[in-house]
Amino acid sequence: MKQKLTITVEAVLIPAAKRYARARGVSLSSLVEQSLRELTEEETVSFSSRWRGKFRAAKRKKDSRYDALAKKYLQ
């Protein structure tokens, strides 16, 4: 169910926002609604982002494959 919302913005912003919405073929209300929806969605952080920087290279004897992977992913 839609509900009316009154907001206050700078007067110079209104014409620009209306032009922006019109150029994209949507109403200003739809544009504001979509922006609010995107801002309030829970951010899903990727697995790699969550763990980036958490691991350190292990001390190993000469292992060129390990060294190459450590250089690529741990630095």
Image (cartoon, rainbow, N blue to C red):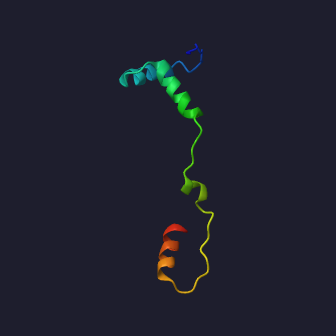
Please determine whether, in this image, residue 42 is positioned above or below residue 12. below
Q: Residue 58: where, in percent of width, then height?
A: 61, 76
The residue drawn where x is 48% and y is 69% is 72
Q: How many numbered dots are placed on residues in this image?
A: 0
Q: Residue 43: where, in percent of width, then height?
A: 58, 42
The residue lying toward the viewer, choosing from 7 and 70, is 70
The residue drawn where x is 60% and y is 55% is 50
The residue lying toward the viewer, choosing from 41 and 18, is 41
- Residue pushed farthest bottom? 62
The residue lying toward the viewer, choosing from 69 and 24, is 69
Q: Residue 2: where, in percent of width, then height?
A: 55, 15
Quadrant assignment, res 22 = top left
The residue drawn where x is 51% and y is 77% is 66
- Residue pushed farthest top? 4
Q: Quadrant of the N terminus?
A: top right
Please determine whether, in this image, residue 68 is positioned above or below residue 34. below
The residue drawn where x is 41% and y is 21% is 26
Q: Residue 13: where, in percent of width, then height?
A: 50, 22
Q: Quadrant of the C terminus?
A: bottom right
